[in-house]
Image (cartoon, helix red, strand yellow):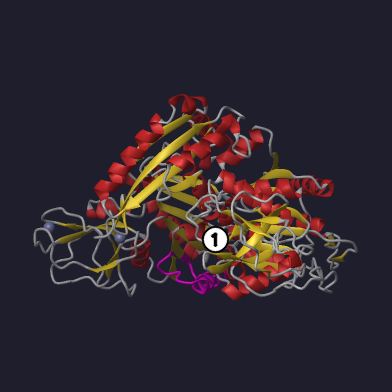
Amino acid sequence: MFARIAVNTKSSKRDDLFTYEIPEEIRDVICVGQLVIIPLGNRSVNGIVIGIEKTKPEFETKKILKIVDETPIVDNEKIELARFISEYYWCGFSQALFAMLPINLRKRKTKILRNDSREAVKDPGHPYGCHSNFQLNSAQEKALEKINNAIDDKKAKTFLLHGVTNSGKTEIYLRACAEALEVNLGHPMSGIPGHWMSGGSGGCIYIVPEIALTPQAINRFEEVFGKDQVALIHSGLSISERLKTWIDIKTGKKNIVVGSRSAIFAPLQNLKIIIVDEEHDLISFKSDQTPRYELHTVAEKLAELSGSVLVFGSATPLVTSYAKVVSGEWEYLSLPDRVACPGQPGGDNSIPPQVKIVDMSSPAHNASHNEAGREGVFSDYLLQALELVLKNKKQALLFLNRRGMASFILCNDCKKVSMCESCDSNLVYHSIDNSPYGIPQSGNSASGGIIPQGKLWCHHCGRKYPVPVKCGVCGGLDFRFLGRGTEKIESEIRKYFPQARIARMDRDTMTSDLKYQEIFEKYKKGEIDILVGTQMIVHGWDIPSVDLAAVISIDESLLMPDYSSEEKVFQLLTQLTGRTGRSNARGMMILQTINPDLAVFENVVKNDYLSFVKRELALREKFSYPPFGRMVKLSLGGMNGDLVEKKAEDMANKLKNLEIKKLKEARVEIVGPISPLVEKKYNRYWKNIILKFVETRGGASKDGKTHGRVSLREELLNLVPKEWAIDIDPLTLF
Ligand SMILES: [Zn+2]
Ligand SMILES: [Zn+2]
């Protein structure tokens, strides 16, 4: 007898399965899914049995050395899922399979699971549902009923839960999980604690973009189901905590998995529901290393394999997700109304916040414009609104998607911008101690006695440079600091409101999850009046006394050469708007822009997702962008820019010449080579080639096997050397 084995090795081959002979003494116990030790070269390494066959292969085989654990560490679902990932994402089967396991389990040489692994705790005696006693509104009831019915049907089904911000999605998630677990949450309104009902319980996965950024939803899960039932999976866990969590789930001690992207691979038994919250956050859901999987695709396959219910929830669903509703693959559930805040009874907070667009190109709106004769940062309108917020003892959020004090440092004599020596990227000025003293005025010369403190940072490689005293090109001594980041906004706003308590949240200040928690708690308690920040402040917080959110500037984001840039802007503005007006007062979002007439802004003002998504889908269809076209990005990097360029040219030509007829049949377009936005990173030069697979409407199949593309994939893989990185469904083309 022989076994097909997935091997945990950094094999350079994309076909990374091996065949080994099963020795006599373990023939009776060996089965698919077991972790085994096998000889490979002169080492012994771990492998997972993925198939057993009788026929002797034509080549020489070695024998399996031993079985680590008789209890299989992966089940058939996971093996099938790995097969799917390797086919869809063009990576090795073993790479996909081992990526699902905790790192220290991948190399484990000794037994880890007891044979009686099903010691599930059925009645931990915890008062479940103690906080789940408020009444759902009719839209919530309707959505929950559909999800619950699907759970009871025990068949795979996918829902898109489109709920405006503050529409009570979390309550639906909690109750749907209770249904899957067969936990009685107690009668709504009664306040009577629920209890486990007798009978088998199922498994639930609840995934959020970043666990540290969504503390409130996580707390609700722990409150309702008990900390001892909820397994948290996130990047903050140590290697040994990861393994312990994995064992707790695998042995049935914990049935609810809450975590970030990789929680999808949790070894739950009897999976019944997968929930992906804030599903629009693609950047968090796409893996940036091999296998470069994306959560939507993997979750859909897992739901199909396990017959579970899948719920994608968001206030701003992805265009590609809505397309699945249009094609009839997913069912659309809508929560159009904001719900009353718990603890804030009587108030009418069902009115959506107001969105105010301020035209920054018009001098009338611009306070500092008049003063200094330059384009200012804050409009009069925003300053007045902030004053009112402070007067009413409420809170405000100020958003800018750029860190640092100044984005460019320019020599006034030769006009050269300070650049990173390792990257094709301008350096950003950061003041180190964060004090408002010694900081050069934006646009002002730093000369005249004051040498600014701080450092220049490369935002691509993280390398730091001293602030220049003398221009490296012309020897000039006069520098200009241009472009403002969050750090600058913070120091400017301090000047306008010296009494206000102001804090900043971006990657410079949030050096750990703990720091983040600290600022979040302070803000929640009302100990911070104005919070300045990047993307981090946009996440699903629910803080009642936030009356105002403002976008300092968004125009640069719309200039990005990216087919989804409008979608990202729509998401960001809508999400930020949703952070306001959660108490009795109506919230407000102020958007400062120099392009006030854009259609996407009108959609935001009217809170009109459907108009946005329909326009966006029409545009994408016209240019064959996802979901109407699928993209494969090939990237090559190297120290020698000329060589990279030549290799990329050669590859593009080879691809274009590759049986043109075949490409046409499969409707594949080859674009490139193109230069990424930052062509030189960490001293390496990069080139991309894009393969665009045009889909016919409704022609995109889940396994990507349309138009004989599997054979085409094999051919392409043979053509493209391993030094090229392959990214299926890349987030950006540049
Ligand atoms: Zn110069
Ligand atoms: Zn750099």
Q: Nearer the viewer, residue 561 or 532?
A: 561
Quadrant location of the N terminus in the rendered image? bottom right
In x, y percent, where is residue 291?
A: 53, 53
In x, y percent, where is residue 650?
A: 32, 38
**Quarter of the image where ligand 2 sits:** bottom left
Give the side of residue 270 with respect to residue 540, left or right. Answer: right
The picture quadrant where one finds residue 175 is: bottom right
Tell me the amino acid under the disc marked 1.
Val
Disc 1 within 8 angstroms of ligand 2 (CB): no
Q: Badge 1 local density, few (<14 within 10 Å), some, or many (20+)?
A: many
Q: Residue furthest left?
A: 475
Q: For residue 103: magenta?
A: no
Q: Nearer the viewer, residue 652 or 488?
A: 652
On the question of residue 511 being in view, the answer is: yes
For image coordinates 40% across by 57% down, the residue present is: 383
For image coordinates 83% across by 66% down, the residue present is: 191
For image coordinates 44% across by 69% down, the residue present is: 503
In x, y percent, where is residue 520?
A: 54, 69
Quadrant location of the C terminus in the rendered image? top left
Q: How many numbered marks have been drawn onto this rendered protein structure?
A: 1
Q: In this picture, which residue range is highlighted in magenta? A: 506-530
Q: Nearer the viewer, residue 415 or 705?
A: 705
On the question of residue 338 being in view, the answer is: no
In x, y percent, where is residue 708?
A: 57, 31
Q: Secondary structure at mark 1?
A: strand
Q: For residue 521: magenta?
A: yes
Give the side of residue 417 with respect to residue 106, left or right. Answer: left
Give the side of residue 111 with respect to residue 465, left or right. Answer: right
> Residue 613, relative to residue 684: is it above or below?
above
Which residue in the structure is indicated by mark 1?
Answer: 546
